[in-house]
Image (cartoon, grey):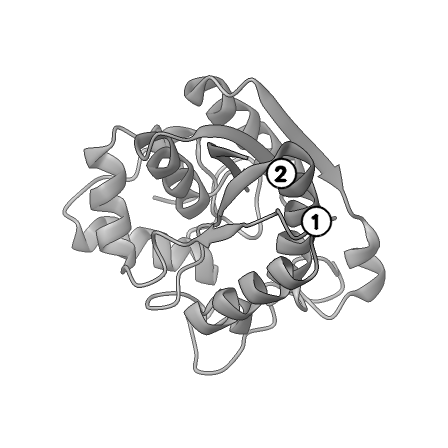
């Protein structure tokens, strides 16, 4: 096994991008994985992914199409008949939650990791300051790691690394600036692909993170 090879799940968002730069700082050779799952901002996220891979000088990457999420629906991100909420983050699991998305992402990534003989998988889940998604918790990731290692070859030993799981958005912004992460290439908006809406849950969390970090977000927002 090559102990310095890691698979990074890279959506093109701020969190997964920072996680990938941390993997590089940790000395891993990075293989990037991106999922096109029928999300509203699929084209923008794919563009962000490619720009970030270029900046990181990633030689090997996977762009995986999993459109069945649009058949499942039940999320404002994959079902255009459901409006993306713009009235602020509320308690409970929001309608932007995509059922078991991270579990499916991790399962597919585990198959790639086993093929590539990677010893680590990086994912930028955030438990402390997120939208309340159940598949972003530390416990969920630990349980997925156990299942992956039980369901792969005996010599396959994969660690799922979540460097941001207990950070706030402000801490994420600060860390990204310290590592010179090109935040201008990242995309967080749930709704728009030209200028970010500024009012969906993801935009609100991102903007608040920059505000608390006393930093300026380099991407464009509608009306801001």
As displayed, is residue 218 above or below residue 142? Answer: above
For residue 217, what is the image quadrant? top left
* Chain-order first, disc 2 or disc 1: 2
Residue 11 position within the rendered picture, expressed as x and y whole percent measured from the top left: 55, 42
For residue 41, what is the image quadrant? top right
Residue 68 position within the rendered picture, expressed as x and y whole percent measured from the top left: 83, 55
Residue under the point 23% across and 39% down:
216
Q: Neighbour class for label 1 at 10 Å: few (<14), some, many (≥20)?
A: some
Residue annotated with mark 2: 34
For residue 47, what is the image quadrant? top right
Query: Is residue 20 found left or right of 191 in the rendered image?
Result: left
Visible in this render: residue 9? no
Q: Nearer the viewer, residue 94 or 165?
A: 165
As displayed, is residue 213 above or below residue 98? Answer: above
Point out the residue furthest to the front here: 154
Residue under the point 78% across and 47% down:
66
Secondary structure state at the residue bearing disc 1: helix
Residue under the point 80% across and 57% down:
70
Count the marks: 2
Point out the residue furthest to the bottom here: 92
Residue annotated with mark 1: 108
As displayed, is residue 211 above or below residue 34? Answer: below
Q: CA distance from mark 2 to mark 1?
A: 11 Å
Residue 14 position within the rendered picture, expressed as x and y whole percent measured from the top left: 40, 43
As displayed, is residue 21 above or below residue 208? Answer: above
The quadrant of the image that shows the N terminus is top right
Residue under the point 43% across and 19% down:
55
Secondary structure state at the residue bearing disc 2: strand
Point out the residue furthest to the left here: 214
The quadrant of the image that shows the C terminus is top left
């Amino acid at each position: 096994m090559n102990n310095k090879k890691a698979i990074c799940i890279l959506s093109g968002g701020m969190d997964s991008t920072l996680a990938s730069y941390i993997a590089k700082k940790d000395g891993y050779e990075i293989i990037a994985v991106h999922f096109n799952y029928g999300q509203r901002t699929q084209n923008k996220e794919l563009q962000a992914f490619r720009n970030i891979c270029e900046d990181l000088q990633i030689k090997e990457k996977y762009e995986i199409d999993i459109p069945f999420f649009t058949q499942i629906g039940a999320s404002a991100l994959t079902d255009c008949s459901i409006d993306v909420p713009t009235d602020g983050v509320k308690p409970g699991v929001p309608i932007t939650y995509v059922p078991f998305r991270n579990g499916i992402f991790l399962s597919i990534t585990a198959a790639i990791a086993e093929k590539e003989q990677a010893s680590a998988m990086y994912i930028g889940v955030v438990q402390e300051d997120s939208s309340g998604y159940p598949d972003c918790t530390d416990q969920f990731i630990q349980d997925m790691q156990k299942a992956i290692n039980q369901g792969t070859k005996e010599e396959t030993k994969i660690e799922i690394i979540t460097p941001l799981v207990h950070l706030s958005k402000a801490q994420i912004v600060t860390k990204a600036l310290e590592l010179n992460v090109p935040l201008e290439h990242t995309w967080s908006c749930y709704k728009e692909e030209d200028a970010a809406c500024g009012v969906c849950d993801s935009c609100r969390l991102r903007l608040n993170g920059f505000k608390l970090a006393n930093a300026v977000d380099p991407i464009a927002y509608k009306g801001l």
